[in-house]
Amino acid sequence: MNDKTVIVTGGARGIGRAVVQAFAEAGADVVIADLRFEDANDTAVKISGTSGRRVVAVQTDVTKREDIEKLRDETLRMFTKIDVLINCAGWDRLLPFLKTTPDLWQKVLSINFLGVVNMCHVILPHMVERKQGAVVNISSDTGLVGSFGEAIYASSKAAIMAFSKTIAREHARDNIRVNVVSPGLCDTPLIDEMRADELTAKILGSIVNFIPLKRLGRPDEISPLVVFLASDAASYITGQVYSINGGLNMVG
C-alpha cells in the first residue's frame, strides 16, 4: 500500500480505527472521515506519530452529501488522488421490530446503508476517471442471517452486500474492485454503549455462547482482510463477501 491514499469512514474508533492503523502500517496515507472529529483527530495524530505516514481527520457526516463533497475536495487537495475507499461508519440499537419507530428506521438506514451509497456516488467518479481504485464496504453477518432486535440494521447490512455486488459489476470495466467484509460480533466502543441497555446486554451475552471460538472478535482481527482486499495482492477479487465471525455462521 506504499503511497496509496485511503479514505476510511468511521475511522475514529472501533473497527474503523484498526483499519486506519493497518493501512498506515502498510505504507498508505489515510484520511479519517468521521462525525466524531475530536476522536478522529486524536486517532490521526497518534497513528501518524507511530507509523510515519500522513493521517488526517476530516469531520464528515456520511448522511450529508455536502460533507462528502468537502471530504473529497480536501483529500484531493492534500494528496491529489484517492486510491481506496473503506466504508466503515455505522450505528445500531437493539430493539424488537414492533418497538421501533420510523425515526429509528431512518437513522439506521441513513447511516449504515445510504451513507455507503452517498460515499460511493461522490468518490467513484474520481476513480472512474483514473481507471483504478478499490472499495471495501463493511457490512455485518446480520445481513446474511438476521439477528434478534436488529430488523432494520440487518436489512441495511444486507443492502450493502447487494449494492456492492452491483457496483462491482458496473465498474469492473473501469478497473475498480468492490468487495465486502462482514464481521460478526466484535468488541468495540459501540458494543460497550449498547450494553448499557439490559435487554441488549442479555442478547449479546447469549450470542457469545454460540460462537465456536467462545469470544467476541477484536477490531485488529478484521482490519488485515480489509487491507488485503484493497491491495494489489487481491487484484482478481471483486464482488465478494467475506465473513469474520469466529465460526458463528458455519454451515454443514
Image (cartoon, rainbow, N blue to C red):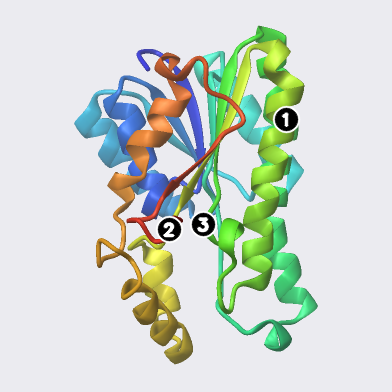
Residue kind at label 1, given as amino acid type: Ile
C-alpha separation, residue under disc 3 versus residue under disc 1: 20 Å
Would residue 231 be visible to someone looking at this image?
yes
Residue kind at label 3, given as amino acid type: Asp
Residue kind at label 2, given as amino acid type: Gly
Image position of 68 with respect to 36: above or below: above
Asked if disc 3 and disc 2 are in contact, CB closer than 8 Å, the reply is: yes
Label number found at residue 141: 3
Q: In which quadrant is the C terminus drawn?
A: bottom left
Question: In the rendered image, which residue does mark 2 sit on?
Answer: 184
Asked if disc 1 and disc 2 are in contact, CB closer than 8 Å, the reply is: no
Residue at disc 2, secondary structure:
loop
- Left of 35 or right of it: where is 217? left
Q: In which quadrant is the N terminus drawn?
A: top left
Would residue 13 be visible to someone looking at this image?
no
| Relative depth, front residue between 223 and 173 | 173
- First-in-chain label (1 vs 2): 1
Asked if disc 3 and disc 1 are in contact, CB closer than 8 Å, the reply is: no
**Position in image of residue 152 (x %, y %):** 68, 68
